[in-house]
């Protein structure tokens, strides 16, 4: 079938197909630009006038690290209190809960869901 045609016919047909495909591609690009023009790389955010913020992965790592750090620090302080006062395990329990609350509050502040102290 395709092998039955001479090579010149196949090349001419391929060139015609490529030209038609390029024309359709240009037309589609023009239609897409008319609907929603794409921002140029390096442009600032049009609504705020500021450069784009951190990626979602960076924000997720920051929130999770603040949460985990609060719990670990609370547990460490509770363990120290238990070692020096002999209140075992109450110091660890109390400070683990306080660390959980502090980690949650810090994560919410970083996410912008809770106002920072001193802000209205």
Image (cartoon, rainbow, N blue to C red):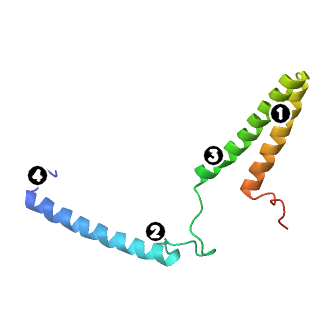
Q: CA distance from mark 1 to mark 4?
A: 80 Å
What secondary structure is found at the residue carrying circle 1?
helix
N-term-proximal mark, 3 vs 4: 4
Q: CA distance from mark 4 to mark 2?
A: 49 Å
Q: CA distance from mark 3 to mark 4?
A: 61 Å
What secondary structure is found at the residue carrying circle 4?
loop
What secondary structure is found at the residue carrying circle 3?
helix
Q: CA distance from mark 3 to mark 2?
A: 25 Å
Q: Is residue 21 above or below residue 107?
A: below
1 vs 2, front mark: 1
Q: Nearer the viewer, residue 98 or 26?
A: 98
3 vs 2, front mark: 3
The residue indicated by pointer 2 is: 41
The residue indicated by pointer 1 is: 96
Q: Position of residue 38 (x, y in %)?
A: 49, 72
Side of 40 relative to 88 (left or right): left
4 vs 2, front mark: 2
N-term-proximal mark, 1 vs 3: 3
Q: Is residue 12 above or below residue 104?
A: below
Q: Is residue 24 above or below residue 84?
A: below
Q: Position of residue 119 (x, y in %)?
A: 83, 65
The residue indicated by pointer 4 is: 4
The residue indicated by pointer 3 is: 61
């Amino acid at each position: 079938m395709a092998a039955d045609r001479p090579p010149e016919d196949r090349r001419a047909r391929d060139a015609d197909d490529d030209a038609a495909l390029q024309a359709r591609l240009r037309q589609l690009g023009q239609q897409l630009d008319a609907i929603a023009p794409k921002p140029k790389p390096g442009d600032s955010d049009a609504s705020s006038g500021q450069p784009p913020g951190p990626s979602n992965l960076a924000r997720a790592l920051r929130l999770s690290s603040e949460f985990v750090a609060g719990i670990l620090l609370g547990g460490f302080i509770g363990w120290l209190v238990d070692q020096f006062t002999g209140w075992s395990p109450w110091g660890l329990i109390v400070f683990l809960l306080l660390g959980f609350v502090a980690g949650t509050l810090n994560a919410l502040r970083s996410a912008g869901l809770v106002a920072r102290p001193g802000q209205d």
